[in-house]
Image: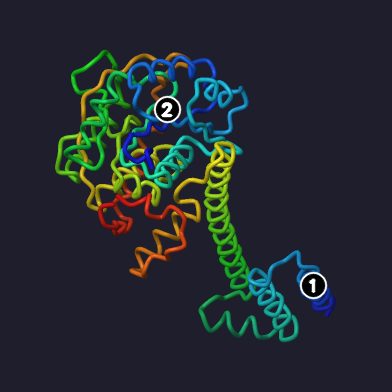
Amino acid sequence: MAEGSRPLIIMPAWNEVASITTTLTETQAAVPNIDILVVDDGSTDGTADAAEQTGVAVLRLPFNLGVGGATRAGYEYAERHGYHHVIRVDADGQHDPADISRVLAGLDIADISIGARFAEHGDYAVRGPRKWAMGLLAAIISRLAHTPLTDITSGFRATNRRATQQFCRHYPAEYLGDTVDALVMAVRSGLTVTQVPVSMRTRRAGVPSHNPLKAAVYLARSLVALLLALTRRPLTTGSEG
Amino acid sequence: MRAIIFFCIITVAILTTILLLLRSGKLKEKHALLWTLIGIACLVLVTFPGALDAVAHLVGFQVGSNLLFTLAILLLMGVCLQLSLQMSAQEDKVRRLAEEAAILRHDLEAGRPSPGHRSARIVRDLALADAPAPGDLPGADGRME
């Protein structure tokens, strides 16, 4: 299959009609030789139709599964269609399409390549408790992965075949389960991780929250996700496929 | 005496309801076991009222009804936990079905089955079990490197 030799972009989208077309056309212009799969997570605003207009493949989930569920569906699709390299990109335009090739290049040295937002690039800033929470998580997971990682909640991730299969088997749908938990399990199952600094752009639609209470809840939930993942039995990975 | 008659009626009602639900297929057998046991336990307690106090005394409860309440609460907690577990399992299955439906719909509309069409999972499980790969899987070769 020709599909195997090209990378695949997985773009989970839930009611992103305001930004999806721009994101897709920009991405197609930036990386013309990469296949794109939009996973429509039960949108009610015509996101899937808008995406299909640009000529990309679209998975229409019958109802909303959450961002983790949508991403996992994308990994399952990639796995069945034999893609060797997969990269997950946000539909709201936060991830700069110009960085896609660089994040994919990280797969040359590791199974998972994370586009990290803090690695002295761009002007993305988080403050207060949320920043501490992310710093603590990053410190713990860096130790586990034996490599310095600064942004483990980033959804901008490239995976090779082995990591894609791992994510097909373990990718919780819950909030933070999809990033922290899946990454910890991947590392504990023997997969290697690297990070590539990327610039983060402001969202095209929607507003990020800076509420201290939400930050505290975020910290608690991410620690729970981390602890659960640390106590779980790691999966035995299959041979490099 | 009146209390015994009252509880007899309740116990018979519980057991009858379970039987009726089982007969009409609304209650699956695996869930019925627990409820049948509860019904039988009620029946035993009603028939031998002295048994409760005897057991309570044996395990160190001064009042028989306290033992009953404690056991009832523990039992209900167990039932709740079991239901939560089953709901989580169901959610996971529903999620897999939704993913499957979306992938199949995509392949159908694109007019070609994906290479792992006959379920990538089965192929993978076969590979893990170290069994010889069935030759009749269409496109199975395309999925290898």
Query: Horizontal placement of B101 versus A173: left or right?
Result: right
Which residue occupies 19% across, 44% down? Answer: A145
Q: Which residue is mark 1?
A: B23
Image quadrant where residue A234 sits: bottom left
Query: Horizontal placement of A202 versus B111: left or right?
Result: left
Which residue occupies 30% across, 35% down? Answer: A158
Q: Nearer the viewer, residue B70 or A87?
A: A87
Nearer to us: label 2 or label 1 = 1
Query: Horizontal placement of A140 versus B112: left or right?
Result: left
Q: Which residue is mark 2?
A: A214
Q: Whole-percent x and y of residue B84?
A: 56, 55
Which residue occupies 34% across, 45% down? Answer: A164
Vertical comparison of A235 with B5: above or below: above
| Number of other residues with Cα within 10 Å of mark 1, as a class: few under 14, some 14 to 19, many 20 or more | few
Image quadrant where residue A46 sits: top right
The answer to whether residue A230 of the structure is visible from this angle is: yes
Q: Quadrant of the N terminus of chain A?
A: top left
Q: Secondary structure at mark 2?
A: helix
What chain does badge 1 belong to?
Answer: B
Vertical comparison of B121 with B30: above or below: above
Indicate how the structure is coloured in the image. rainbow
The three-letter code of the residue at mark 2 reads: Lys
Vertical comparison of A98 with B140: above or below: above
